[in-house]
Amino acid sequence: MRRTRIAAALLLAVVASACADLLPTTSRPASGLIVNSGSCTATLSSLLAQADTVFGAGAPNVNSVVGKINNLDHHLNNNNPAEAKNRAFETVAFVLQKERENDLAGTAEEIARFVNAIYCYAGLDITISDPANSWLIYPSDSAQIIYGLNNTAGISFPAFPVVEPSMVTIEEYNGTLNTVLDQYPGFIYIRLQNELSSALTGNVTISVCATGVPESVDLSDLRLGHGIRDTGFVVTPLPTAADPVEPTLTCDAPAPSFAARIIDRVASVLSPRSAQASAAMVRRFGGGVSGTANEFSPFAPVDAALSFGGGVSGTANEFLRAPSLLLEEGASEVMSSVEPCSTTSVGADVPTECLPVVTIQTRTVGTKLEGVPVDWYVPATSGGTIATRGGIDSQISCGSFGRTASSLTTDKGNAGVCWNVSTVGTYTVIAKARIGGDAPEGVRFVNGSTGADSVIFTVTVTPVTISIVAGNNQTAAAGTTLPISPTVRVLDANGQPAANVLIDWTALGNSDASVTPTMTRTNASGEAWTNWTIGAGYNELRAMVRNASDSTAVYFTASGSSGTVAINSCPLGGGRDPINDPSRPFGFWVPGPANGITMREVDLYFGASGKANAPTTYQIALITRRGGGFLGPVVDTTIVPVELRGNASENKRATFRLRNPIVGRSGNASSAANAVAMRLVVISNPDGATLNFNTGPCPLGNCKPARECMATEVNLQTVTSSKLLGDVYRRSVGIQIRGN
């Protein structure tokens, strides 16, 4: 049997009462007038007259039914209403049996009026409208199947189905079910009527024929929808081995008049466009659609498979630049404008129009489902993070980022997440929907492209290249912003300008330099720039693509003039000593500036023993003391960010501009009282590397450097209160000191 789930819009109907249509009379010979709760009237004479009409005057069976009616009347006259009701059921059973044997002369309408009059005369509020689709069932019945509406609907009852004699009727239903799921012709209304309004004793299995099903819908996806108490809705459970067997229906093309009624009914609930499509497809029929229930009301085939896809079209494994091309309710097909967003350049955010979005809707009418929970997760094999996304169709806001997120579909059937990706590689996010909101129990979610119950989004982050366009090797006054903005150009893997790429700018090598802003995005030409304010002496600026490899960076240099001149200068040498090796602590001292000279700037040269060619930024502090050698008071601490590549012989220059310049004074410049003692301290060391400084031209021990080179390296372990400048370790340090 074919089953599934669907979405469109169809619900209730009005089932007419028949008692009010009974032939009215004003008198009753012998037995008087019987009134049933004020809703109908009947007399013995009218019943006998109807018997002649239904069975035919003089027909063999007319005497039998007249006898049954007189017996019913006898019990009423003897004040025995219970037995009168039993006789009424017996009489109705006889009438319906003869109707099925085609042994009655009356029309279907006359037979129904006769049956309703019998019930009314006995005081039973039970009516039928079509004797061919009406059955009496009893508490003692064995398991049975009844078929109605030309064998296009059936009910399979278990043994002992009711607790009192009950009337079961099957009617065509002119309403729709209270659900957004797509519904197809096959609408029926089943009623159970008895004296005490008692219910069925257990589940029955109901089957109906589905018609007008589009070729795009798999008939196995159809399920039986149930309008609970007319205003609710459930997708009925599929029959199991414990339930009554499924009825075997004849789901052939209906008679033209019935087909016309189907078209009219579909047209009344769908938009004109959908109605035309349904009319064109009305010749397609499915098999019986079955489900189990323990109460009766409206039933109809529904498509319990919901379209669950990325963007609009359900395309998997790619982004859609038009993820939310929404259609008005009633559209009979999903239309989309698809442009892949399957790649993005490293450093670029996933574009807003490419963020993962799913749309949940019915497959034929395209009704959007609201409030359906969607769970998102990043699989273990992928990097990246996601966050609950607000503002699918307006301003986007993102929640906390992690490996999982949850969202609910909007009134347009959409749900999405924010997505962070980083380095070069392929990233994946998976979405799965759950029951909730407009999606009732029993439906399933189908990705139209893959048939799976999930949607997979992937994006590949591709490498880029970066180059300097303008602003390198400038000279300007210290403390000013360079006249030519440092500018870079970024190209994608195909050599085309990469837009929206994040560029991080970092001022290096100088304690006074700054850059604003520190992050910019490339424009449509792939270019980005910033403003660089330089300090005195050497300046370096790094431009690096966000999240890119270390090789995706370029460096600008600039020189800041401050009116200073060199007052102490030692050239670079081949020796290097550690800054942050506790077992080998080094410092150095230089003669204090002469009277009338102020020491303002110090250049030093650094390297690192670590990961070769892996640029890392370290914060290095220069601590300056005076008036007591290495034990004297601190007069200045200046910190410079220095980027080193893990090459011990790199000799990267850095300029420390003293916040508190050292003013010259008279006396012995090399005495402990006047000498300037300096020590380097690593403030930030991200990779734990051993940093070093260049020791200038002299080897260990005594050496006579050039006259302008006046710097002495000291092992700080030799410093004591009696040796404030310690013992000489080396007669030089790679240094330049400037002042004025």
Image (cartoon, grey):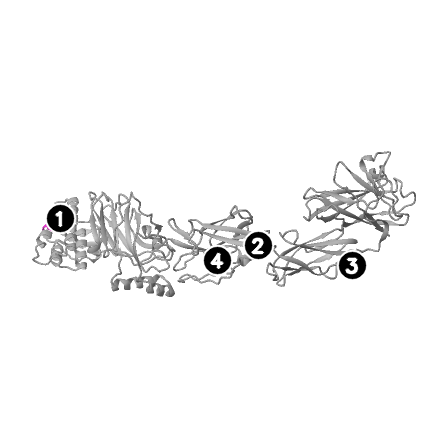
First in residue order: circle 2 vs circle 1: 1
Do labels 3 and 1 touch, CB within 8 Å? Answer: no
Task: Name the mark on residue 17.
Answer: none
Q: Is 722 situated left or right of 151 in this image?
A: right
Camera-side residue of 232 and 355: 355
Q: Count residues near mark 2 (Cα–Cα under 10 Å), then give few for <14, some for 14-19, many for 20+.
A: many
Q: Amino acid at mark 3?
A: Thr
Q: Count residues near mark 1 (Cα–Cα under 10 Å), then give few for <14, some for 14-19, many for 20+.
A: many
**Magenta highlight: main SS:** helix
**Residue at the disc numbered 1:** 72
Q: Is 234 situated left or right of 627 in this image?
A: left
**Residue at the disc numbered 4:** 311
Distance from disc 2 to disc 1, alpha carbons, whole Å, reads 87 Å
First in residue order: circle 3 vs circle 1: 1
First in residue order: circle 2 vs circle 4: 4
**Residue at the disc numbered 2:** 461
| Residue 273 appearing in the image | yes
**Quadrant in the picture for residue 559:** bottom right
Q: Amino acid at mark 4?
A: Gly
Q: Amino acid at mark 1?
A: Leu
Distance from disc 3 to disc 4, alpha carbons, whole Å, reads 53 Å
